[in-house]
Structures are given as structure tokens and as C-alpha cells.
Amino acid sequence: MQNIGIAVTGSGSAVPSTFLDNHGLAEIVETSDEWITTRTGIRQRHLAKCSESLSAIAATAAARALESAGLTANDVDLILLATSTPDDLFGSACQIQGILGANRAVAFDLTAACSGFVFGLVTAAQYIRTGVFRNVLLIGADMLSRWVDWEDRRSCVLFGDGAGAVVLQANQSDRLLGFELKSDGSQNSCLNLAYTCEDQELIPGVSVSRGKFQPITMNGKEVYRFAVQKVPEIIDKALFHANLSPDNVDWLVLHQANQRILDAVAQRLNIPENKVISNVSRYGNTSAASIPLALDEAVREGKIQPGDMIAASGFGAGLTWGAAIFQWGR
Ligand code: ACO
């Protein structure tokens, strides 16, 4: 089998235009800007209204990523959409393919909650390494605001909507240097967006389930503990596979769940604050979108430069967690 290198050659992002700051949230639930900023670092989050579809915002992020990679929609072989909040339970990747006019591309969704982007990156890499596809569009997009309980102050302050995308391409030099992925279903109850149902009898003895998804439930303390312990461990493992140490990392790009988690992970890895990419204050936790959204902003601001070593790590419901070590650009 061929062994083909992988490069991350472009990025893009998009968020809904409306945002809600902490003062606005304090009109909905009993909370304060002071409580939210000191516990989470979040100051505002963008929220999508009914007319703003996940597919449309994801397609905007994707088109920007293609442009920055110098590709057209027709060059794309595979569209991978990491999301837990599709417009259609059958998947939204094909809707994005349609909007972009990426007629040659195979398109499908991948669900791994806030780890979706890192799981998607590794999945895309397998197709490229084996020579199956050369140009992959990987999108992380979520609109958790659709599923938040807006009366639950413990969770509604955390989440926001958005989309980020990257282009992965077959490349002579391999820029994906290491990764590690993990899942632990025994802790599934920490964070759920669960389907509940009742039986509907069709004929005597034959029933089907009729139900709906319930709002997000979360054990914040358990998720915090899990993230602070498991994320440094998995980044260390991925760095080990890459033959690198935390000293070699130029940028730590973590799932933007909470500033306190970002700080604690960086501290455990001994990575200084000025190497930690953070935009959680402006977007909150955008789930699968958060890593590519943070990455894209840092690239466009000129912080992340070609050749820079990035340690990215996602973590969330499942529970799932993963890390990937890659250099930016060809
Ligand atoms: N405003 C004001 N008070 C609040 C709020 C709020 N928004 N939320 C909770 N409180 C109160 C609680 O009721 C509690 O009061 P009590 O002691 O009178 O009962 C007090 O504040 C402390 O609550 P805790 O839940 O213990 O607060 P904690 O310090 O654990 O912080 C937080 C909560 C911010 C959610 C923290 O646990 C956390 O960051 N966890 C990680 C959550 C996370 O990142 N989830 C997503 C990751 S996975 C994914 O991305 C899908």
C-alpha cells in the first residue's frame, strides 16, 4: 500500500450574525456576567435563528477554506461533516455538497460531539494515506443552541453556534505527525442529548417507538475533571507518536469549552499561555466547530504560520477525546 503524506492547506469559518452577551443571558436565567466570566471565560456566544441552517453556515466556512487552499469545489473528493446537530438526521454533508456544487465529492456526517473535528481529521487522513482520496474538506459545525435547555443556568451559559473548516490534501511531505483517539462509554451519562420515547402500538403485539430528543443534560463537575485529566494525557501520547515533546509545540489549539480547562491543560503540559489559542470569550463552546474556528482565526490573524507545530485536542460527549499533532501548511 502507498504511504502518502498529509497537509492541512486551508481554513475557513463562519458564525451566525446574532450574539447574546452575558448581560442578556442574565435576563433569561438567574446568573451574572461576573459568575460566567470567572467560571468559564465566556463573554458572549453567537446564536442561529430558525432561518439560519447548519448546512448554510457550514457551507460558508467550507467555501472560505477552499478559497484559502486555492481549490475549487470541483477539486473536492470527500466532504466530512463533524456535527451532532444536523439539519436532517439522515445527515447534512450532502446538503453542503449541494450548496457548494462539489459534484464529484462523496459526503457524509461523522458524530463524535466536541471531539468530532479531531476524529474527522484522523478519518480524513486515513483516506488520503491509503490513496483513496486526495482532497478532503473537513467541516466542524454545530448549533447546540437548538438543544440547550434555556432554563438550565448550569448549561445554557456555555454553548454557542458556529462552523469551521479545513482542507486536507495529499502531500509529498507528511505534516500529520501523530494522533491518538479514545472513547469511554461507561461515562456516557455525564453529557447527553438523549432520545426519549413511548411505545405506539401499530397492531396488537407490534409497537414502534415514538419520541423526541431532550435538551442537553450535563454533569459539569465530572466533565471538568475528565477534561483536565484526560486531555494532557492524550496530547502527551500523540506527541510521543510524533517523537516530540510539549517543548516542540508552537500552538495549543484545544476544544474551546472553558478558559479554566484551557489554562489547566496548558499548565499540566507546561506550555506557556502565549502559545494557547483562545477565542472562547467571544464564541462560547461551539462543539465540533470550536477547534477549526479557533485555528482559522489564528491563521487569518497571522499568529499561526506555515510550518508551525500545532497540538489540537477535542473532548466531549461519549465520552470521547482525541489529539492530533500537525504542522500548518504544505
Ligand atoms: N450562574 C450563577 N450561578 C450558577 C450558574 C450560573 N450560570 N450555574 C451554576 N451556578 C451555581 C450552582 O447552582 C451552584 O450553586 P449552589 O452551590 O448554591 O448549588 C454554584 O453555582 C456552583 O455550581 P457548580 O456546578 O459547582 O459550579 P462549577 O464551579 O463546577 O462550575 C461549570 C460549573 C462552569 C459548568 C464547570 O463545572 C465546568 O466548566 N465544567 C465543564 C463543562 C464543560 O466544559 N462542558 C462542555 C465540555 S464537553 C462539550 O464541549 C460538549
Image: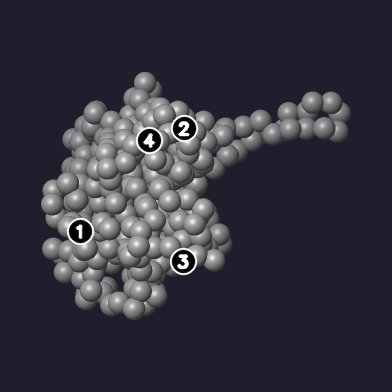
Residue ID for mark 2: 103
Of labels 3 and 2, earlier in sequence is 3
Residue 90 falls in image quadrant: top right
Classed neighbour count for the residue bearing mark 4: other residues with Cα under 10 Å, few (<14), some (14–19), many (≥20)? some
Residue ID for mark 1: 306
State the residue in front, 209 or 323. 323
Residue ID for mark 3: 3
Quadrant in the picture for the C terminus: bottom left
Residue 60 point in image, percent of width and height:
31, 33
Residue appearing at x 40%, y 48% in the figure:
135
Residue appearing at x 49%, y 47% in the figure:
111
Give the spatial CA distance, label 4 vs label 3: 26 Å
Classed neighbour count for the residue bearing mark 1: other residues with Cα under 10 Å, few (<14), some (14–19), many (≥20)? some
Task: Give the left or right position of residue 212, taking residue 147 as reference.
Answer: right
Type of amino acid at the residue the image marks with label 3: Asn
Camera-nearest label, 3 or 1: 3
Type of amino acid at the residue the image marks with label 2: Asn
Classed neighbour count for the residue bearing mark 2: other residues with Cα under 10 Å, few (<14), some (14–19), many (≥20)? some
